Amino acid sequence: MSNSSPHPFPDGTSLAHDARPPAVAEGGRSLLDLRTQLVSPSSPSLRRTGWKFSHWPNCSEANLVLITSGVARRSRSPNAETQSEKTLADNWKIANGRAGSRSRRYFVTNELRYMWVLTFAESQLDRRTVMKLVSDFARRLRSMGDDTPFPYWYSPELHPEGHGWHVNLFIPFRVPHSVVELLWGYGFVWVTDFASSHRGPHGEPLGLCRTPREALRRAAQYGCKYSQKDWSPEHVERSNHRYEIAQGFTPEISSTWVRDPLEAEALIADLLPADGQYRLQTWDSNQDPDWTRVPVRTWRW
């Protein structure tokens, strides 16, 4: 008697073709793990590696990053402890850079041009307490109007002469000095308008800005510069934040995968306004001999 089933096993079982449709979840998605496939997924949403182009339309800013999935293994060596310290320092530098980029986009999107310096008459050494006091102050400032949330960014800074912390708070609108002084209530306050002032809070020359957006970027750079030196591990513990922002004002972002940097350059050409070419600023990690991470390109205009 012949066995009609294809490829019979010794025990009589076979690998008969199963004509049933594959199992799917609600919404038509396959229940199989597509990551096990040996082919590149056609859907952009499933892609995990390659050149990723991101654009922040309200910031006039874009970047291109080579996304990779490989993880390099580090060999154990006699100076492994020194290498570990260097790795921690590099990671801290990367984290600071990422925080600075995110802050810059937040500043530009929300037009944070006014920097208020909030001081303490009595030395305040507890960073957590300082952050809470500023949060309470922002709440009081909001209640002075119609209680509508507004964007803000703030970070404490250590006084160079050992007087403890003071705070740099950025907001998008002007408030009378007497009002801020009354609502703060812990010490002196003063303000700098980065869109119009020629000098910074310490009297240093700022120079003129060609565009309002340039002034906002300068405000972000100033805020991060004077707080970044206090973002070290001994000042910012794991449970603390480098800075605080108002929720609900995150910059809009649009991302897509591109074939190569040439395609990204073509996208930039389409995004630039008619008068944007003359103020376009670019940076390419390939031109930095000390760059050891994945390739990155940035554009600002």
Image (cartoon, helix red, strand yellow):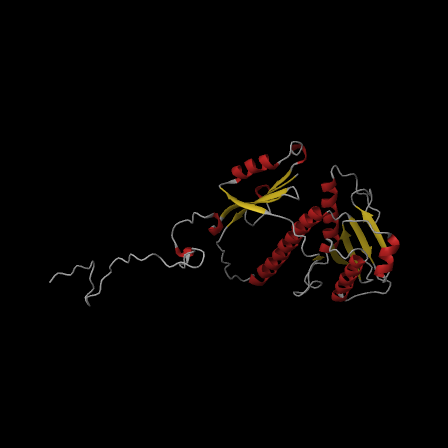
Visible residue check, residue 188:
no
Q: Point out the residue furthest to the left here.
A: 1
The answer to whether residue 42 is left or right of residue 60 is left
Q: Residue at x 64, y 57 (%)?
A: 92
From where the camera sits, is residue 262 visible? Answer: yes
286, 241: nearer the viewer: 241
Give x and y (percent) for residue 134: 77, 61
Count of marks, rendered view: 0
The one nearer the camera, 144 or 133, is 144
| Observer-nearest of 108 and 221 | 108
The quarter in which the N terminus is drawn is: bottom left
- Outermost right residue: 178
x and y percentages locating residue 83 in the rendered image: 58, 59
Displayed quadrant of residue 297: top right
- Residue 50 lies, with reference to residue 148, above or below; the image says above
For this view, does 247 lie left or right of residue 254?
right
Which corner quadrant of the image does residue 37 belong to?
bottom left
Q: Residue at left 55%, top 39%?
A: 264
Q: At which x and y percent is residue 137?
A: 79, 61
Q: Residue at x 81, y 53 (%)?
A: 116
At horizontal 77% and vertical 60% (from top left) the residue drawn is: 139
Q: From the image, which quarter does the C terminus lie in?
A: top right
Q: Position of residue 281 (x, y in %)?
A: 65, 38
**Depth check: 50 or 144 in front?**
144
